[in-house]
Amino acid sequence: MRILYGVNGEGLGHATRSQVVIEHLLARGYDVRVVASGSAFVHLHTQLPRVSEIFGPSFAMDEGEIHRWATLRLNAANAGHELPDTVRHWLSVVHEWRPDVVVTDFEPLSALYARSMLVPLVSVDNISMLVRCHHDEAIVGADLADFILARAITRAMIPTAGDYVVTTFFRPPVLWGRTTLVPPIVRPEVVAATPERGDHVLVYSSGDHGLLDVLEQAGVPARVYGMRGKHSNERFLEDLRTARAVITGGGFSLLSESIYLGKPVLSVPLHGQFEQLMNARYLARDGYGMCAPAAGPAELAEFLLRLPEYSDALDGYEQDGNRVALEVIEERVAAAARDTRRRRREARRMARRSA
């Protein structure tokens, strides 16, 4: 079976999740070729065979806030000189190879290829949650405009797929058929880790230096990652494994790893990023932590006070590594590839009859 696998390059969450899936498919004997952009390409081309770089969208950000119009201008300008050459290069390669199925982790060009060439498309990501599931008023709240925009962008990024496998730690009602919710895909080293409770709080932030002052004033020891001037990630997993709690944004990957390891989370989603806000609100609804617009003294005090409550809720969370997610993904991909082979056999028979 030949699988074209597209990986979105914004952040590393898509790349680390896709690496787990691709390594599983390779181990099962499938022929997988990867197209990725941005940081996903930088990471994956050193970890996997046959990884090609393509153009991908990025976000314009300042002080933890996504600027929508600047993002639009940035991607329009980049696409103008990067997109044509990128598309020509990998289309010529893919056309000769003829994949049986395309898998996309929110990567639009591979999805566009699948649609234009009538190749089955399987979507594997967490962001499709915005479109494929129902989110009630308590989750959307006063952010309806951001929700509508995020949903529209999600639809525009990925043409309609045959199957959607949505990775998630929360379970809202599914709106559309051929949508399967599976547990988050976490890194193998996280699966292998044995969680312990230490005294420190792990902080992963893109630049809220005031948070460090708040923690210091509260006498809370912290291990800090992600801020400017703090680049060492060598001990990140160990600090996460032994953390008392986690303070971070609303990014799906770290929230998922924290929940998997039983770590309460104070989530401060990025402004203008409804997907992060959604993740954080579901986190709070399920009792795994707190969603807050900022991590000030009052928010930190409430979070620390409620740590036993959050820990009790996390004790009830169950996930058997990546087994369920990988089984579902492989089954969907194999079924789509069988359909491709069947249609190609029928086309050959029709061609012979008409000759």
Image: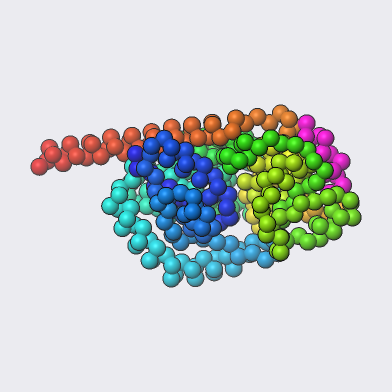
- Front residue of 303/30: it is 30
Question: Image point 70% across, 63% down: which residue?
Answer: 228
Q: x and y percent of residue 43 in the render?
A: 52, 54
Q: In this rendering, does residue 134 appear at all?
A: no
- Front residue of 276/264: it is 264
Q: Is residue 293 above or below residue 1?
A: below
Q: Main secondary structure of the magenta part?
A: helix
Question: Image point 58% across, 49% down: which residue?
Answer: 13
Question: Image point 69% across, 35% down: which residue?
Answer: 194
Question: Image point 41% across, 56% down: which residue?
Answer: 52
Range drawn in magenta:
299-312
- Front residue of 76/134: it is 76
Q: x and y percent of residue 247 in the render?
A: 75, 49
Q: Quadrant of the C terminus?
A: top left
Q: In this rendering, does residue 243 appear at all?
A: yes
Quarter holding residue 289? top right
Q: x and y percent of residue 190 in the render?
A: 63, 40
Q: x and y percent of residue 142 in the render?
A: 71, 51
Q: Quadrant of the N terminus?
A: top left
